[in-house]
Image (cartoon, rainbow, N blue to C red):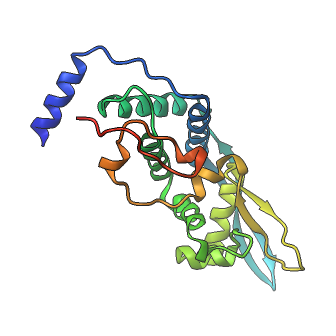
Amino acid sequence: MRTLASGFLHNKMAEDPPVIRETENQAQIINNLALLLARGRAVIRTKKVEYEKDNQVRNYYETEEVQIEEPFRATLQLRTLARALAWIHGRKHITDHDLELLRRVVLSTMPVDRAEVLSLFQKPKCLSLERALTRTICAAGIGKSRNRANQLLTELVRVEILQEEQTVGGSQEKVYKPLPLLAEAICRPVQPLDHILDCDIGQTSHFSTGTTHGVGNPPT
């Protein structure tokens, strides 16, 4: 396999690469994924704060600084990856398969605890009736304490991936939902990929249509 992969890439690099351009919709998807990547990998600095309750000194960690890289570098890397995937599959256009692989790269490169919380949005059984998370639901879903769930949800709000909303009906718990701009990339379930079927030439993107249609012949 190593020899075959090396020979394949050697032959590819001997050619002039095709001109591959994203559609307007694909460019927006890549921009959104880059934004999710940059925010998901944000660095948060906290400080310990002490307070007294019931004659006991308690503490919690308060966010002191949030550092989020601008998404330009991530956009360039993801765009390059999408074009490279199309090229090695013998296409001159980007397909749904390429964009889905980009999404999986993004979701797998943020800190594990944050990714674990976001993965709950792909499981309707782990969400409230409003398709949202609460601290209690999140704690049960990730198998951590309620305080840890609260810390992670707060982080995801501070880096602008989730938004915090007040519940209706008198409940004291707040609910958390993805920002609309990032909801598609976060909430869509990760399904097994059929690499042969998904590499058909002439696909349309389910990022915009909700379906995938292979209308060409597999590349040789």
Residue 214 x, y percent position in the rendering: 41, 44
Locate residue 85 relative to residue 38 in the image: left or right.
Answer: left
Image point (27%, 35%), residue name:
219
Image point (59%, 77%), residue name:
125
Q: Quadrant of the N terminus?
A: top left
Image point (62%, 73%), residue name:
138
For the question of whether residue 42 can be seen, the reply is: no
Image point (38%, 32%), residue name:
86
Question: 141 and 5: which one is in front?
Answer: 5
Residue 191 x, y percent position in the rendering: 44, 60
Q: Which residue is at the far top?
A: 16
Q: Which residue is at the far left?
A: 3
Locate residue 117 relative to residue 95 in the image: left or right.
Answer: right
Residue 131 x, y percent position in the rendering: 69, 69
Looking at the image, residue 174 lies above or below residue 90: below
For the image, the number of numbered tags is 0
Q: Quadrant of the C terminus?
A: top left
Looking at the image, residue 165 lies above or below residue 144: above
Q: Quarter of the image holding residue 57?
A: bottom right
For the question of whether residue 159 can be seen, the reply is: yes
Looking at the image, residue 18 lies above or below residue 35: above
Question: 13 and 176: which one is in front?
Answer: 13
Residue 74 x, y percent position in the rendering: 52, 34
Locate residue 61 relative to residue 12 in the image: left or right.
Answer: right
Locate residue 159 relative to residue 23 in the image: left or right.
Answer: right
